[in-house]
Image (cartoon, helix red, strand yellow):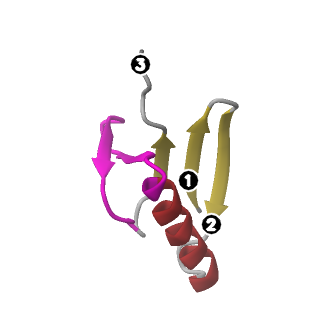
Amino acid sequence: MATQIVMDHTGDSRHFFEKDDHKQLAEAERRFEKLTGLGFTAATRTEDGDLHAIRSFDPTAIETLFYPRLVGG
């Protein structure tokens, strides 16, 4: 089971999906496109546990983290 973790001002929400379920996979891809379109950064974990930013949906990723743009002032 794969996970998409969305970080925002309220904390985080987790969305789980089976990679071999075409309907769930399509929904995960739509979520990816929507969040990155809103300015969220998407990243996957490397084997070392580090984050690696990605620009397109990776259907093989076990975990994808979305975090909003940093706002300074």
- Residue that label 3 marks: 72
Q: Which residue range is magenta in the image?
A: 36-58
Q: Would you call the spot at circle 2 few (<14 residues within 10 Å), some (14-19), or many (20 or more)?
A: some
- Residue that label 2 marks: 17
Q: CA distance from mark 1 to mark 3?
A: 26 Å
Residue at image coords 57%, 84%: 22
Q: Would you call the spot at circle 3 few (<14 residues within 10 Å), some (14-19), or many (20 or more)?
A: few
Q: Are marks 1 and 2 in contact (CB under 8 Å)?
A: yes
Nearest the eye: 61 or 72: 72
Q: Quadrant of the N terminus?
A: bottom right
Say which element carries label 1: strand
Say which element carries label 3: loop
Examine the rendering and report whether any part of residue 65 can be seen. yes
- Indicate the position of residue 49 as horizontal and vertical percent values: 36, 36
- Indicate the position of residue 73 as horizontal and vertical percent values: 42, 15
Examine the rendering and report whether any part of residue 46 can be seen. no
Indicate whether residue 46 is drawn in magenta.
Answer: yes
Return the residue found at the far top.
Answer: 73
Mark on residue 68?
none
Upstream in sequence: badge 1 or badge 2: 1
Q: Would you call the spot at circle 1 few (<14 residues within 10 Å), some (14-19), or many (20 or more)?
A: many
Q: CA distance from mark 1 to mark 2?
A: 8 Å
- Residue that label 1 marks: 4
Amino acid type of the residue tagged 2 in the rendering: Phe
Residue at image coords 31%, 53%: 54
Upstream in sequence: badge 1 or badge 3: 1
Return the residue found at the far bottom.
Answer: 22
